[in-house]
Image (cartoon, rainbow, N blue to C red):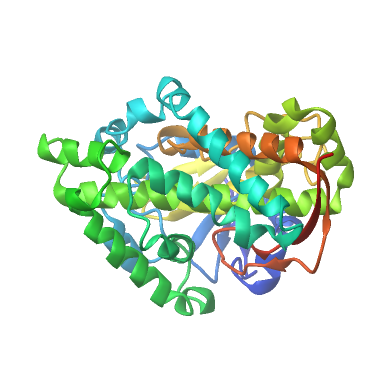
Amino acid sequence: MSAVRPETDVDLFGPEFVTDPFPQLARLRQQAAAVYSTKWDFYVLTRYEEIKAVAADWQTFSSGEGVALTPEINNVIAGTILSTDPPDHTVLREVLGDQLAPRGLGKIRAQIAEYAERIVAENVARGEFDAVREISRVFPINVVGDLVGLPLEGREKLQPGADATFAGMGPFGDYLLSHLEEMGAYHEWLEGMGDREKLVPGGWGEKIMDAVDAGKITPLQGTRLITAYLTAGMDTTVNAISALFRLFCERPEIWAALKADPSLAAPIFEETMRWHSPVVGFWRVATREATIGGVTIPAGSKVMLNWGAANHDPAKYDNPDDFQLDRNPLDHVAFGYGPHGCAGQGLARMEVVTLLQALAAQVDSIEPAGDVVVSMNPIVRGLKSVPIRVTAAS
């Protein structure tokens, strides 16, 4: 065991760290398997194998004790699908189990592909547009909104609210405080979706309400389940798509490869998820004293699983800071791992792959049309603006 607790005084949510976390994460990884943040009072994990092991061991590292940094947010989300352990977590997850299984997703593939083709065509006709505003923040939001059965009116609250909600998992810093209004409007609107009359019949929201009526979950759990799937179903996909557009501008050879062979859409998406890692990480609480890589973690300690650090671990991936077209890292942890591995990751893959295939079919070239603007959300690695110029396929 480590005689001296490995520590860092680096602000893990400061502007410099948020803008480019990977150099500092590499230094922390070299320091120890688990390093204590003296500023924020938690242990941060940065190594792939240890993060996977902790994510799988829910008995020792509990989500039910809190997946957010602050007690205020943990109290608000207590009992949700994000912040429960089995068997309660299993019950909540099974509500949409059939819909999110491969067979269920197969039934909606054509619907998603048709929308991808349409939104690409609309923007190709413009020639020049902001890829974040016109595609990244529109396509996945409407896909998930339609599947849940949400009314069209009010959907403009979804992306800003989900982004602020993710920020709420971290510290009460400037970013969160400046987006509290969006968070409040988002949750107020979604609380009304517990009324089945507001949901389109046949959607996932109705399925969740059926589980409420059957007594499988409570009405509060039903509303929170809708919120959880919407929040998780948007920001990862939104920011992965944004990162892809930026990548195509900065690495035109990757776009050329996709254009020449659209079957590369899936491995390009997987490498983007590993390389960009949209969700920084979540917390667990140690239910008992544990040892991680020789470091003693006292019972009751908060432990942050930094997914991005795991995905850039050189012990797992050669030259991890490089985007490699032929890597196809299906074992990345950008969707989490263990009982809380993202239930909607199959849907996310379907959305992005169909979008990339639509782009390859309809677009010849993509080039930058302005400066990229980076989001300062401390929990979600996002982009606020990626202006691009495209030429239509001949």
Against 122, is 171 above or below? below
Which percent across, then down, holds residue 184? 34, 71
Residue 293 visible, this orientation: no
Q: Residue at x 23, y 60 (%)?
A: 192
Comparing 340 with 113, the one in front is 113
Question: In x, y percent, where is residue 177?
Answer: 46, 79
Question: Observer-nearest residue: 383 or 189?
Answer: 189
Q: Position of residue 118 (x, y in %)?
A: 59, 43
Q: Quadrant of the N terminus?
A: top right
Q: Is residue 48 left or right of residue 189?
A: right
**Residue under the point 34% across and 44% down:** 148
The quarter of the displayed image where residue 301 is located: bottom left
Q: Please say if 224 is above or below 378.
A: above
Residue placed at 43% from the left, 45% from the top? 144
Q: In which quarter of the image is the C terminus?
A: top right
- Seen in the image, is 25 located left or right of residue 280? right
Task: Specify the farthest residue to the top.
Answer: 103
- Name the residue at 32% across, 64% down: 187
Of 305 and 131, which appears nearest the observer?
131
Which residue in the rendered view is the most extreme toward the right?
Answer: 253
198 w.r.t. 167: above or below: above
Residue 49 seen: yes
The total of numbered circles placed on residues is 0
173 in relation to 126, above or below: below
Left or right relative to 242: residue 155: left
